[in-house]
Image: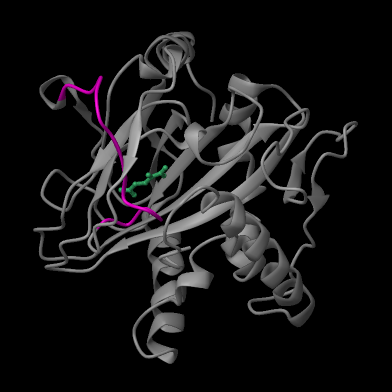
Amino acid sequence: MALTTPQVEQFKRDGYVYPLDILGGGEVADLRQRLEAREEMQGGKLEAGQRAKSHLIFKWLDDLIRDPRILDPIEQLIGPDILCWNTIFWIKDVGSKSFVSWHQDTRYWGLSSPDVVTAWLALSPASLESGCMRVMPGTHRGDVLPHEDRYDDANMLTRGQEITEGVDDGAAVHMPLEPGQMSFHNYRLAHASGANNAPDRRIGVSMHFMPTDTKQIVGEWDSAALVRGNDRHGNFAPTPVPEGDFDPAAMAFHARAAKAQSEVLYTGAAINTQKL
Ligand SMILES: O=C(O)CCC(=O)C(=O)O
């Protein structure tokens, strides 16, 4: 799976590219089933702490962040030495009001690199009706826009952070995806998503890839998985590869890694809403 030259150019110019056909129908149905079986076992939901750094919890997600069908196009964008910093589940149940306000992740993640790429995989239909992501083309090339913490319960973001100026909703581009398709966007790009008004859950999982020379400049300690090439910089503690779902050693590491990351995400926030 390779990006075409126009797709690479579009990513550089506009900050996103979609839809990318990554997983087959049977494969994506199997992953959704595994996730939902776990949710059911736990009473219907993932816990907040299980939503992030989730590749340390679910072996199938660790396999996915190392999958050449994802890494080959990521390498075209950020080079051959690749860390996966995070994985996050974005689940909007049927009838849920959950939404994501306009924001730029670079403002909150404490990462030094301008080249962090979010790869977002649809495990169920992500349509206009179900609240797919929408983006503001080109915003990854400008300054980071002003944000305000608005703490809306329905907002899936940690502090309900929202861009206060510089976004024109009318000029936004929606990125609908079928199950098994992905979008890639630069983490400096302004993006958002609406509520799920569709008859199925909207289930996505994001994977955040960065070059190995990236540094964590807010937190004192952070972790990442080396998923391709060599890490000559050692700026992030290497995450263990789980032997199976809920592997005790990986879970112990997850507890530390998720806490450290949460501290970065809530740095400067008035309230810790414990959403991640
Ligand atoms: O899933 C969504 O609607 C938003 C995801 C998001 O903000 C992200 O992947 O950075």
Q: How is the image coloured?
A: one colour
Q: Residue at x 42, y 12 (%)?
A: 142
Horizontal side of 130 relative to 221 (left or right) equals: left
In this picture, is 244 found above or below 174? below
Residue 58 quadrant = bottom right
Q: Seen from this angle, which residue lies furthest right?
A: 232
Q: Is residue 69 visible?
A: no
Out of 198 and 254, give the one closest to the viewer.
254
Question: Where is residue 102 shown, x and y percent of the image?
Answer: 28, 36
**For residue 166: magenta?**
yes
Question: Where is residue 99 shown, x and y percent of the image?
Answer: 22, 53
Horizontal side of 209 relative to 80 (left or right) equals: left
Q: Seen from this angle, which residue lies furthest front?
A: 270
Out of 191 and 155, give the one closest to the viewer.
155
Residue 29 quadrant = bottom left
Quadrant (top left/top right/bottom left/bottom right) for the N terminus? top right
Report the number of discs: 0
The magenta span reads 155-168
Q: Is residue 92 visible?
A: yes
Q: Residue at x 24, y 23 (%)?
A: 165
Out of 177 and 246, give the one closest to the viewer.
246
Question: Where is residue 198 shown, x and y percent of the image?
Answer: 10, 59
Q: Give the overall secondary structure of the magenta segment.
A: loop
Question: Where is residue 254 shown, x and y percent of the image?
Answer: 68, 68
Horizontal side of 33 relative to 201 (left or right) equals: right
Horizontal side of 231 relative to 7 (left or right) equals: right
Q: Residue at x 39, y 25 (%)?
A: 17
**For residue 210: magenta?**
no
